[in-house]
Amino acid sequence: MSPAQVPDHRPGTALVRRPGPRFDDGLTTHIDRVPVDPDLAARQWADYVAAFRAGGWATVEVEPADDLPDAPFVEDTVVVVDDLAVVARPGARERLAETTGTERALAGLGFRIERITAPATLDGGDVLKLGSSWFVGVGGRTSHEGARQLADLVAPLDIRVVPVRTSRALHLKTTVTALPDGTLLGYVPLLDEPDAFPNLTPVPERNGWRVVLLGDDRLLVSTSAPRTSQMLVDRGYELVAVDISELEKRESSVTCLSVRLRGLTLGTEDACC
Ligand SMILES: CN(C)C(=N)NCCC[C@H](N)C(=O)O
């Protein structure tokens, strides 16, 4: 079993990227568009990053990109496993330029770089990792060819890619999230193929219920899904809840704003990249 398949629940390093002054211009697809206060979004983003640092994580900041409104959603620009960074090719043309900064940051940290190449597209938000089986949402921002290219790149790590049709939500990880024990949470009305996911636990809320594993049984969640949060508490998880409501106005969730890197030996100080 390659290291990629052994879930690592220890704190690591979170790759993040701050929102810029044009954050209000960020894309919306499946939600009603409302104005955003970029200063409030920046403060909430800082609180999100602080939650990682409080949990023992180091943080690495991708160079800011004030001309790219969706830059904070760094999850979509790369898929990382072990020492491999697969640079994505976002399905929204407005976001293509975001990958340059992410690639520069990860190359600077010594990651082995591979890329999804045109005409294929892939957003990292469509990649749900579940041990040696990765579910990849296709039909929206990620093309079937993008899923195929990813499959070829991770096959040497004994990882199998399972394409899943995703048309009712922005990304696969808008609809499904994985708990540390491998249980999947999902909002069933947004799933094109609910039967594709083993032991799926339905959540009561449409938005705000995704999770990021901070370590052991500590989960980073949004304050926007209190009923799902109570479900997690009842299952024995310790929650760190952050208010990212201004960021959620541009279709964000807690998974979008970071890429978790393992095996790095950075301290808990910021590493500039
Ligand atoms: C899991 N999710 C949803 C993500 N990883 N990405 C959110 C991207 C939002 C951005 N405004 C856009 O429309 O691309």
Image (tube, rainbow, N blue to C red):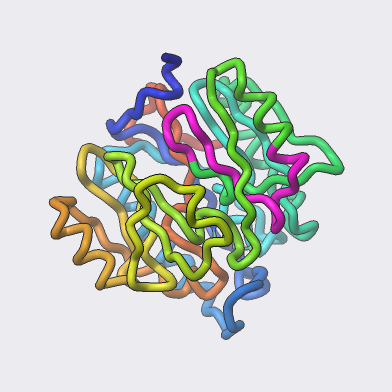
- Numbered-mark total: 0
Residue 142 located within the stretch drawn in magenta: yes
Q: Residue 205 location, x and y as percent? A: 37, 73
Q: Residue 8 location, x and y as percent? A: 33, 28
For this orientation, the residue located farthest to the right is: 119
The residue that appears at 70% across and 58% down in the rendered structure is: 140
Q: Residue 13 location, x and y as percent? A: 40, 35
Q: Note whether 39 is above or below 80 in the view shown.
A: below
Quadrant containing the N terminus in the rendered view:
top left
Question: Can residue 53 be seen?
Answer: yes
State which quadrant residue 265 falls in.
Answer: top left
Indicate left or right for 37 with 146 as reference.
Answer: left
For this orientation, the residue located farthest to the front is: 195
Indicate left or right for 230 with 222 as reference.
Answer: left
State the residue in front, 22 or 13.
13
The residue that appears at 40% across and 66% down in the rendered structure is: 44
The residue that appears at 43% across and 40% down in the rendered structure is: 14
State which quadrant residue 215 falls in.
Answer: top left
State the residue in front, 234 or 163.
163
State the residue in front, 73 or 174.
174
Region of the chain picked out in magenta, as a range: 129-147
State which quadrant residue 85 falls in.
Answer: top right
Quadrant containing the C terminus in the rendered view:
top right
Question: Can residue 100 be seen?
Answer: no
The residue that appears at 29% across and 33% down in the rendered structure is: 9
Ligand 1 shown in quarter: bottom right
Q: Residue 51 location, x and y as percent? A: 30, 52
